[in-house]
Amino acid sequence: MHVAPSSYAGTGAHIDSYYAASANPAPERPPLVGDHETEVCVVGAGYSGLSTALHLAEKGYRVTVLEGARVGWGASGRNGGQIVNGLNASLQTIERRYGKDTARFVAGLVMEGGDIIRERVKTYDIACDLKHSNIFAALTGAHMRELEERHALWRGYGIETQEMLDRDALRAHVRSDLYVGGMIDHAGGHLHPLNLALGEAAAIESLGGTIHETSPVISVDTDAPRPVVRTAQGTLTCKTLVLCGNAYLGKVVPGLAIRVMPVSTQVMATEPLGAERARALIPSDACVEDVRYILDYYRMSADHRLLFGGGTVYGGSDPRDIVAKLRPNLDKVFPELKGVTIDYAWSGNFALSFSRVPQLGRLGANTYFAHGYSGHGVTGSHTFGRILAEAIDGDLSRFDVFASLPWYPFPGGRTFRVPYSVIGSWYYGLRDRLGL
């Protein structure tokens, strides 16, 4: 039995972001009050929890989701909204670290998350401004060689949705003089992330599932034959428990807290630029990210704002001035936007694993978990939600592959993981600046 601190989310209301300001209407769901039972309890109404719950509800399971704040309050409602295929750890890294068989297995599912999202949007008529294609932009010749290596390797595994772009070809998608070329993934895309989460929550309820908001979990008992989850006002006993708190699970389960580190990233939204000006900057309306270690990522919203993100703060704290942190990079990418008004700026945490590979596993016989997407959670969470649902339904074939991969603690443990990671980011940032 582990007891956690009080709620991390204040009133539980969404933070002041562009996404919250433009969110679709959604009901306020009541907290868990009293003692209840369910077949499957899912902790966390972000993408991992929602994906798991929706897959299980579609299979006929009785599912209850507990969320400490509002649906999509964490990273799932604050991220850059980019559908980027792959894990944070590249296929090159996975092949080198775990062998070709594991790399072949991962290659077989790295496109799955985007397909799940598109299927969900279509099946449940989710209004989330879904658009197609993402760009990887190169600032140096070394970056181009890295992309060419990735392109060749992915083609070797049968993935042929990517296309290399020289400088002129890239300008048909991104009108910035900063880049020497890039690569487009035609199977990528972008969307309004909070509205996707809200739509998936509504889909779960349409199939008979239950969601309790403002119900932060204060303890879990994973040793009992039927796991018990306790909130401030109630308990939920279940046959199967799924922990999907990711960066916001806190210390509820210390054995999971040591596996990942919260890292914050920042996003800001400009004033509406108008259709003509937006099209002049990103003609194809694809989303863009560069290939540096600490990268910029950006896209146009449905109402023609530039949503521009980047930066990292290890440990998950918010920078004092988000606009001051991001504005210099925006001005380098699009100098013509100097002086444009920034209407929103916000921050949020993702969970970083030391290996940069997401982690799936079990605690005891009846408690499952997924976390550690390391900044690639939009697609990965949807895939891993399906894999968790498969495992709970009796098909452990894909779950066991990921569960068997070794995980590594951050050097120095919780005390020194932040300074260690900062030193690493300085090193890779220097390599980026030197064009290595």
Image (cartoon, rainbow, N blue to C red):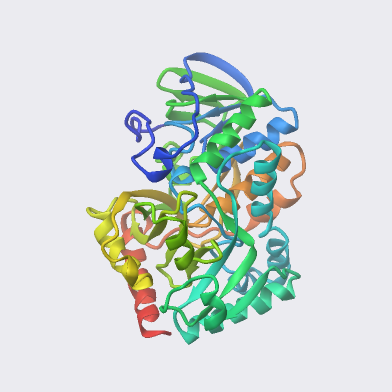
Q: Residue at x 45, y 29 (%)?
A: 219
Quadrant in which the C terminus appears: bottom left
- Point out the residue furthest to the front here: 276
User: Would residue 246 be visible to someone looking at this image?
Assistant: no
Q: Residue at x 38, y 30 (%)?
A: 12
Left of 430 or right of it: where is 124?
right
Q: Position of residue 20 (x, y in %)?
A: 41, 39
Q: Position of residue 323 (x, y in %)?
A: 27, 57
Q: Residue at x 31, y 69 (%)?
A: 331
Q: Nearer the viewer, residue 1 or 23?
A: 23
Q: Nearer the viewer, residue 300 or 381?
A: 300
Q: Is residue 40 above or below residue 324?
A: above
Q: Position of residue 225 (x, y in %)?
A: 63, 26
Left of 272 or right of it: where is 211?
right
User: Would residue 355 be visible to someone looking at this image?
Assistant: yes
Q: Position of residue 202 (x, y in %)?
A: 59, 30
Q: Nearer the viewer, residue 20 or 230?
A: 20
Left of 274 or right of it: where is 164?
right
- Point out the residue furthest to the top here: 34
- Point out the residue furthest to the left here: 320
Left of 59 or right of it: where is 232?
left
Q: Quadrant of residue 224?
A: top right
Q: Residue at x 46, y 17 (%)?
A: 234
